[in-house]
Image: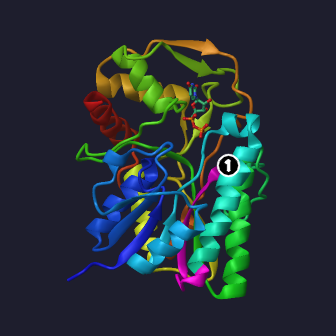
Amino acid sequence: MTRPAILVTGGAGYVGSHACQALAAAGWLPVVLDNLVHGHAEAVQWGPLEHGDIADRARLDHLLETYAPAAAMHFAAFTAVGESVADPGKYYRNNVAGSLTLLEALRDHGVGRIVFSSTAAVYGTPETVPIPEAAPKAPINPYGQTKLAVEHLLADFAAAHGIAATALRYFNAAGADRDGRIGERHDPETHLIPLALDAASGKGPPLKLFGDDYPTPDGTCIRDYIHVADLADAHVRALDAMDAFQAYNLGTGRGASVRQILDTVERVTGRAVPHDIAPRRPGDPPSLVADPSRAMAALGWKPKLSDLDTIVATAWAWHQRG
Ligand code: UDP
């Protein structure tokens, strides 16, 4: 029996490749469209890789005719906050204009279900934590602005064209596939856990801990780390629970400080994490923690692998293969 196809833009990237794995396990055929600017061809293991760009309408028309997907998952985007500040045009062109081209193509080919990879960056610096979906949207960088703009596009397309669209706002995606087949690989790497593992293994320099004078219990920033396989699971569940435009936070509801992450890395790896205290990184709010209750209720979703030990152990296993 042929499996129904799901178009996965950006399926060669970190969260997208884990979503493909989860889609295949649920009986779908993930068809990846990725320009491989940041994605990795070897991460595409559960269906065809179509090398191309979401901004290429002719390419989209051909793909949508060939595979007639039942739905689309849209991960393709540039995601580096610092770069978005330095070169906003690149982000608006790729993330917003590219998404518009994709949405119009999906609409014209009758693909009426879209799951969108959004971010807690739409909230900017929140007034209170944990953060519910209704909290003010006030991104503090162009990356967050582009993700919020696409949410607006989706909401307007849903209203005008009867499309069902779900935006999943990730907090801090972390960890790797338990089988060690795929994991996190950014170039350059800017994220805490891979950099801490690099420092612990001696593959990278000592970690720079950005600020220990925040108004938090140990003075370091608090984030809500969510295992990438739990994110992937939420995407598959969203396919069955779609209704007009909806947005859901994906996090655990529990915060962990940078120092708690470093302690976990030391315990799990059995190695010290060399680190230096550095100045605060511009744009880092002291605390970002999700209120995930809406996703839990509507999607029947619950994080299963997002305790810090499992996150770090799976990331460490992946790190040691690289
Ligand atoms: N962080 C750090 N040193 C690093 C990278 C990150 O101290 O080299 C801190 C950062 O200030 C934040 C947390 O680790 O409080 C998570 O940062 P990351 O870049 O992984 O994710 P973000 O929260 O920015 O999406």
- Judging by the rendered image, the residue that carries numbered circle 1 is 121
Q: Residue furthest left?
A: 1
Residue 107, by quadrant, is: bottom right
Spot occupied by residue 72 in the image (x, y as percentages of width and height):
49, 71
Secondary structure beneath label 1: helix
Q: Residue at x 59, y 75 (%)?
A: 105
Q: Residue at x 37, y 54 (%)?
A: 18
Please say if 4 is above or below 176. Answer: below
Please say if 65 is above or below 226. Answer: below
Specify start and end residues of the magenta stretch as a single range.
107-122
Spot occupied by residue 41 in the image (x, y as percentages of width and height):
36, 47
Residue 267, by quadrant, is: top left
Spot occupied by residue 187 in the image (x, y as percentages of width and height):
49, 32
Ligand 1 occupies quarter: top right
Quadrant containing the C terminus is top left
Find out whether residue 310 is within the magenta segment: no
Please give left or right for residue 52 compared with residue 138 in the image.
left
- Relative depth, front residue between 52 and 191: 52
Find out whether residue 108 is within the magenta segment: yes
Amino acid identity at mark 1: Ala
Residue 99, by quadrant, is: bottom right
Please say if 124 is above or below 266. Answer: below
Quadrant containing the N terminus is bottom left
